Image (cartoon, grey):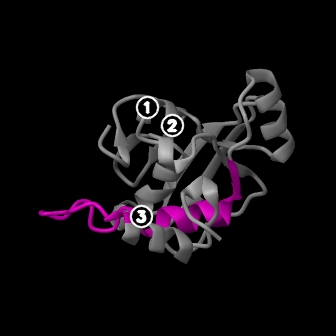
Amino acid sequence: MAHPFTAVPLGFSVMGRDALWWGGCAWDSFALPHLLPEQSPVLVATSCPACDTPHAWHVDDREPPPGDQVAHFLVPTRHMWDDVVHTCGNQRIFCSEQCVTDWLARTGNQRGYVMNLPTLWRLASGWYAGRLERGYVRREPSAAADYLRGVGLSGPFWGLTD
């Protein structure tokens, strides 16, 4: 994996104007049109882990796609890098909160963080800014925290205090 790209299928495909990628997770899939505006809009496709309903959105870098679906992030940020493939494989989009609840009951997992599509889109919009530029340096933890707060995320799941 070279976020937001992956050679491992983890539940998302992302098709741009002239390229097709595996999306590592919901976050990365929604980030690609921001990182590659020349490919925008991209077609993000996945299926609900609870009921297998297929979903697809045209995602661009101007506004969030429409939809009542929700993204569920299972792994809290403080543990995301413990097993990044597990983390990415469990940042998924569900039909609804009820599908999240059904999936959690079936798998025995604890509820993570649930967000709507506009919040997911905002999270993804600037996270990888500069990633493809020579000399890119990943964010320092304090800058990452400021970014997360700036897109409206807070609380212990994100490693932030309210």
Residue hosting label 1: 83
- What is the distance, in whole Å, between disc 1 and disc 3 at their CAs? 20 Å
Residue 87, label in figure: 2
Instruction: Name which residue type carries label 3.
Output: Trp
Count neighbours of disc 2 (C-alpha within 10 A) and say few if under 14, some if 14 to 19, many if 20 or more: many
Q: Position of residue 29 (x, y in %)?
A: 49, 49
- Of the pair 48 and 151, the residue shown nearer to us: 151
**Relative to the observer, which residue lies in front, 96 or 160?**
160
Q: Quickly name the residue at label 3.
A: 127
Element at label 1: loop
Question: What is the total number of numbered labels drawn onto the structure image?
Answer: 3
Residue 130 point in image, percent of width and height: 27, 67
Please provide percent x and percent y for residue 20: 39, 42
Which range of residues does the magenta coloring cover?
113-141
Q: Are marks 2 and 1 in contact (CB under 8 Å)?
A: yes
Q: In percent of the image, x 39 and y 69: which residue is there?
A: 142
Quadrant of residue 73 in the image? top right
Task: Indicate yes or no whether the magenta region holds residue 158.
Answer: no
Nearer mark to the viewer, of 3 and 2: 2
Q: State the SS at label 2.
A: helix
The first of marks 3 and 2 along the sequence is 2
Q: Nearer the viewer, residue 24 or 74?
A: 74
| Disc 3 to disc 2, C-alpha distance | 17 Å
Q: Residue at x 35, y 44 (%)?
A: 5
The secondary element bearing badge 3 is classed as helix
Q: Amino acid type of disc 2? A: Thr
Distance from label 2 to label 1 (Cα)?
A: 6 Å
Which is nearer the N-term, disc 1 or disc 3?
Answer: 1
Residue at 49% of width from left, 39% of height from top? 13
